[in-house]
Image: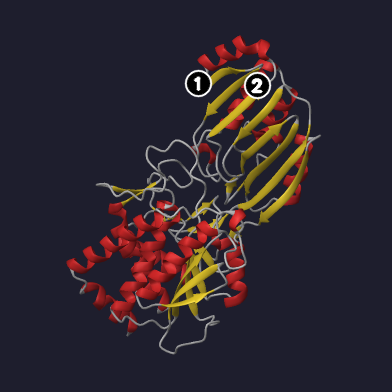
Amino acid sequence: MQVRMFRKERANMTKENLIKYKKEIEEGISELVKLPTIYDGISVTKGMPYGQNVYNGYCWIKNKALQDGFEVLEFDGHALAIRIKNPAGENEKSENRIDILAHLDVVEPGDGWKESPFSGKITGAYIHGRGTQDMKGPLMTVYHVLKYIKENNITCKREIRLVVGCDEERTMEDMHYYIGKAGEPAFAFTPDGNFPFSLGEKGALMWHMEGKMSSCIKELEGGVQCNVVSPKAVALLKDSENYRAYEDACKTAEFQAEIMKKADYICITVFGRAAHASRPEKGINATVLLLDLIRRVSRDRLAELIWQCFSDNNGKGCGLNYEIEPMGKLTLNLGILKIRDDRITADIDCRYPKGVAAEELTSKIRQSLSPLKVTLEYDDAPTLADKNSSFIKCLLHSYRKATGDTVTEPLISGGVTYSKAVRNCVAYGPMFEGDNILAHQANEKISRKSLEKLFEIYTESIIQLGNL
């Protein structure tokens, strides 16, 4: 009965209502993007566990939800849940619920933006700024699906929650905290991937490297974040006698490089292209290019050691080139590298397929980077959902019904989403096959045209899940 009621409501949605919701979604995305919700360790407090910047976004979405008449559950600044109770009005720790998991935090903008990364500018075809794809655009779309459900008095058998976390891009401690307090939902999805959905995700780990080794490098700094392909790297080199050789190498390089003399040193800046670490082939790692330049011109042992390990996106340079079905190839990214007076620190991202353990990978990369020390700082094992689950089948049916796409199949992702922190959770949209994925890259933007289709897909999916 409730599913039939939903279909009637959908059929009666007027063009004016659709225009209204789309306009509100666009305005909400723009306003939220203007808030630079980047983790700030300096301003962390008990009430703001991820700092002032993220907390500003937390307060914004909380106040918006309260003004729109929603019940909001708070989880000590780690997350909040915007709640539509089921008719039975179950308690706050009900397991008979559907959670849609979104996040407020964004990665550092990095360089290469044509306009301010936090402009929230709306142009003819796009909304621009950091987080429009990952994931303030999807967050606001799902928010308005809940608003549509509430304003049209559409009932579901299950409770529906939009859970908004604050630290997905770093540790996911926010979602672990939420689940610890609220319990596991019956099912969840996060609009933080590709359609139709990600049936599984590769394992994700982070290594930290440090040590001391003599080098011609006085200083080097490359990268913006561990899970981002380095878009820029700068080095100060001691061997000024090689200036002409470096100048020639920069002129003939197939990448953008700048060189200048700085006192008795050579200063070289290399520009690459940022991309998400799970898709390193979409970017160009400026740090790796700079190391290659230094090893070739100066025959530097340190540059050679690190370059050799990270010269291949799939880990061939250090014996990590695993390819195991159904998840495919391992990927490796030198996210951040800092060198100062022969002291080296680095953060490394790796996405690995089911069938190989983090301990084995760690042993191999330690051997490759010796005498530098490598420690395993973070590891989330691969996940693989049950394709025969009624919830999974419901998602696929809803997607196919809303789009007419009967061809595109579920995929395996190299990304790390909240499905790593919550059981029975998959990534579901917002990107379609062929979309220009700009998450973690300069000039991130989301298509205004796609928002209407996203609203339709998520409305269909959420209410069908709620009535399953």
Say whether disc 2 or disc 1 marks the residue closer to the N-terminus. Answer: 1
Determine whether 378 is above or below 282 in the image. Answer: below
Tell me, for residue 254, which label it has, or none. 1
Q: Is residue 362 visible?
A: yes
Q: Secondary structure at mark 1?
A: loop
Whether residue 293 sits left or right of residue 442 in the image: it is: right
Q: Amino acid at mark 2?
A: Ile
Q: Position of residue 401 (x, y in %)?
A: 32, 65
Q: Secondary structure at mark 2?
A: helix
Decide which of 261, 377 is in the foreground and name it.
Answer: 261
Q: Quadrant of the N terminus?
A: bottom left
Q: Is residue 460 visible?
A: no
Q: Residue at x 60, y 22 (%)?
A: 267
Decide which of 116, 90 is in the foreground and name it.
Answer: 116
Give the residue number, with chain letter if any, for mark 2.
294
Q: Amino acid at mark 1?
A: Glu
Decide which of 466, 258 is in the foreground and name it.
Answer: 258
Identify the image quadrant of residue 2: bottom left
Q: Position of residue 30 (x, y in %)?
A: 35, 55
> What colour scheme governs how the chains and residues are painted in the rendered image of this protein?
secondary structure
Tell me, for residue 62, which label it has, or none. none
Mark pair 2, 1: CA separation: 15 Å
Crowding at dot 1, Cα within 10 Å, few <14 / some 14-19 / many 20+, comes out as few
Q: Position of residue 172 (x, y in %)?
A: 59, 60
Q: Quadrant of the C terminus?
A: bottom left
Whether residue 189 sits left or right of residue 433 in the image: it is: right
